[in-house]
Image (cartoon, helix red, strand yellow):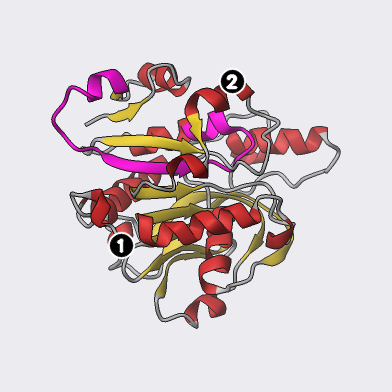
Amino acid sequence: MPIIIHNSLPAKKVLEDENIFVMTESTAYIQDIRPLNILILNLMPTKITTETQLLRLLSNTPLQVEVTLLQTASHVSKNTPQHHLLDFYKTFGDIKHLKFDGMIITGAPIELMDFEDVDYWQELSDIMQWSVHNVYSTLHICWGAQAGLYYHYGIKKYELKKKLSGVYSNVLVDKTHPVVRGFDEVFNMPHSRYTGVKAEQIKKHSKLNILAQSEDAGVAMIGSQNGRQVFVFGHCEYDRDTLAQEYFRDVDKGICPDIPFNYFPNNDPNSEPPLTWRSHANLLFYNWLNYYVYQQTPFDPSKIR
């Protein structure tokens, strides 16, 4: 089944060129099927890249998914054309009267800031509070996962000794959780962050389960017992070259970053990195949509509580 997107969204051509099944809104409206309504709160500065990455993963299921893109009104994006935001994005005021089957909260490159110092923290807090009763299941990614754990559970992040960047092996801790059903016991996932959370803090909360952990990267995935919240600390949505782009950007800035771990063959930045995480990325999104959105959300969205 296809993912439903705006007729002229830039991701449409990219995904069609990859032979991914995309349906435009005009075609979807004539079908007598209720799609899953997924809200993406895109906090990344490169919004077009991020929305394409997420749409690619949402499309790889037999479910019909309709996506609404959301931006914060209290922060002006400097890296995405304003006409793109005006054409394709909503703000919280536009959608807060609606209910959604699922929501994704992306990461943001602001890990070293205190949460309360982020200019849109109050707005994000309002959205997360609203999501408790207006979204059936929310998938939080990287900084979005840290923000969600802090807001909902009071779990604080801590600063790492240096930036964590690379493709890390993650080991399943809870093999029975539906969101990791079908996963290999050890799987790869890119990580790119300056902060993390401590496992002992998570274990204090009876409603949270650590699903996967990395010896080198720490806690990798957390799920609430009822499946209505999932927290992923890596970036399984990343493209093959995303870590490379971040690395060369930091080199150009004179930051002198370490070469991303387990990424470039022979640690040679001039070589093409292998794509070793895509299958588990697809499986994660498939499981989340299937087990905690499609099979759990009421057919009538107004009954979401």
Q: In which quarter of the image is the C terminus?
A: bottom left
Say which of 178 and 304 sits in front.
Answer: 304
Instruction: From the image, tell me which residue sits under label 1.
Output: 305
Is 32 covered by the magenta stretch?
yes
Q: In this view, does 78 lie to the left or right of 140?
A: right
Question: Is the C-beta separation of discs 2 and 1 under 8 Å?
Answer: no
Residue at the spot x=31%, y=41% of the render? 37
- Mark yes or no: residue 268 visible: no
Say which of 23 and 70 sits in front.
Answer: 70
Give the crowd class for mark 2: few <14, some 14-19, many >=20 residues within 10 Å: few
Instruction: List x then y, in percent, for residue 11.
Output: 45, 23
Circle 1 SS class? loop
Magenta-colored span: 24-51
Residue at the spot x=59%, y=35% of the render? 242
Query: Disc 2 marks which amino acid?
Result: His
Q: Residue 83 carries which label?
A: 2
User: How many numbered marks have been drawn onto this rendered protein structure?
Assistant: 2
Q: In this view, does 299 lie above or below 229?
A: above
Please report whichever mark, 2 or 1, sits nearer to the chain's N-terminal start.
2
Is 65 covered by the magenta stretch?
no
Instruction: List x then y, in percent, for residue 133.
Output: 37, 61
Q: In which quarter of the image is the N terminus?
A: top left
Alpha carbons under labels 2 and 1: distance apart = 35 Å
